[in-house]
Amino acid sequence: FDKQSHNLKNKSRNFFETIGDIVMFFLKIFAKFYGIIMIIVGVSTLIALLVGFFTVGITDIINFPGVNFFEITNAANIPVWLMSLLLFLAIGIPFFFLFYLGLKILVNNLKSIGNPAKFTLLGLWIISILGLITVGVKQVSEYAFDAETVLQKELNITANDTLRITVNGYERYKNAYYINHNNFKLIEDDEGRKIVSNDIKLIVYSTTDSVAKISIVKEARGSSYSAAKERAENIDYNYGFSDNELQLEAFHTTGSRNKFTEQEVRVIIYMPEG
């Protein structure tokens, strides 16, 4: 009985060892495949970051759309090269370790890069993350305050008159832009780079006054009330009035140096009853 029991244990042990070897074989194949994927992802990401850093972050030879968009939305005036460097370190270092881990999986006796290099890269990554947080806080602070300017004039419209309103679109800027966002464009003409926006609101109120009035309210944001006020004052918006017809423009413009800080224009018309 002891002899048969011993033989059965040996056979069972051999069977499960064989099963274990088969499972480990497939796990090793899967690990090698996963390591190859990690290397490909890490290398491709690092190459893309290097190309982006040296073409966008350091040189401005080519007008990349993303750079132009960053230019007008960068209210905090963060240098492009600094932002590119912080993003390069924050994204590149984790993908470098992903690439290194993939090599460790494929090469069993791969030498370590050493603790000094690891801690240096970790320190640079922490600094880049803190830098991005600082940049984000500074960027958000540029929208902390809003201010507006109001220009009000009378319109020669009285009771029983009819006011016709026409709106002129911004077809003349149709092809003269670098960036076409949801409600603004970055254009360049003889006057330089400008932000053209169609964020116009038309509001009509009734009034007991005998004469109609029009108010042009320009609004913008900034890191302080004075900065927001200055940006609001730098909004250009025009309209015309003749023969009981009010010609409104469907866009307003501002210099690219003022950045895109949610500038908007409200056209408020006060119409006499009747």
Image (cartoon, rainbow, N blue to C red):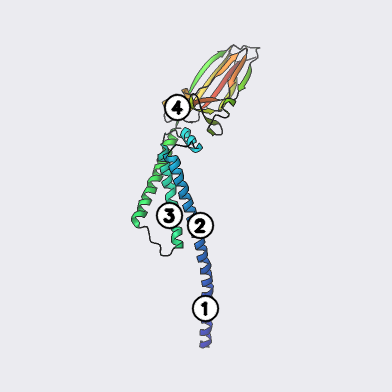
Q: Which residue is mark 2?
A: 37
Amino acid under label 4? Answer: Ala
Separation of marks 2 and 1 at Cα, in angstroms: 34 Å
Query: What is the crowding at mark 2: few (fewer than 14 residues within 10 Å), some, or many (at least 20)?
Result: some
Residue 7 against residue 127 in the figure, above or below = below
In percent of width and height, residue 49 lies at 45, 46
Separation of marks 4 and 1 at Cα, in angstroms: 79 Å
Q: Residue at x 56, y 18 (%)?
A: 239
Residue 121 visible (yes or no):
yes
Separation of marks 2 and 4 at Cα, in angstroms: 50 Å
Is 17 left, or right, of 109 in this rendering?
right
Amino acid under label 1? Answer: Asn
Q: Which residue is mark 3?
A: 97
Q: Quadrant of the C terminus?
A: top right
Query: What is the crowding at mark 3: few (fewer than 14 residues within 10 Å), some, or many (at least 20)?
Result: some
Is 162 left, or right, of 4 in this rendering?
right
Residue 247 against residue 173 in the figure, above or below = above
* Mark earlier in primary sequence (2, 1): 1
Contact? badges 3 and 1 (CB < 8 Å): no
**Tally of marks:** 4
Query: What is the crowding at mark 4: few (fewer than 14 residues within 10 Å), some, or many (at least 20)?
Result: many
Viewer-nearest of labels 3 and 1?
3
Viewer-nearest of labels 2 and 1?
2
Viewer-nearest of labels 3 and 4?
3
In percent of width and height, residue 122 lies at 38, 51
* Front residue (pair 249, 136): 249
* Mark earlier in primary sequence (4, 1): 1
Give residue 228's mark.
Answer: 4
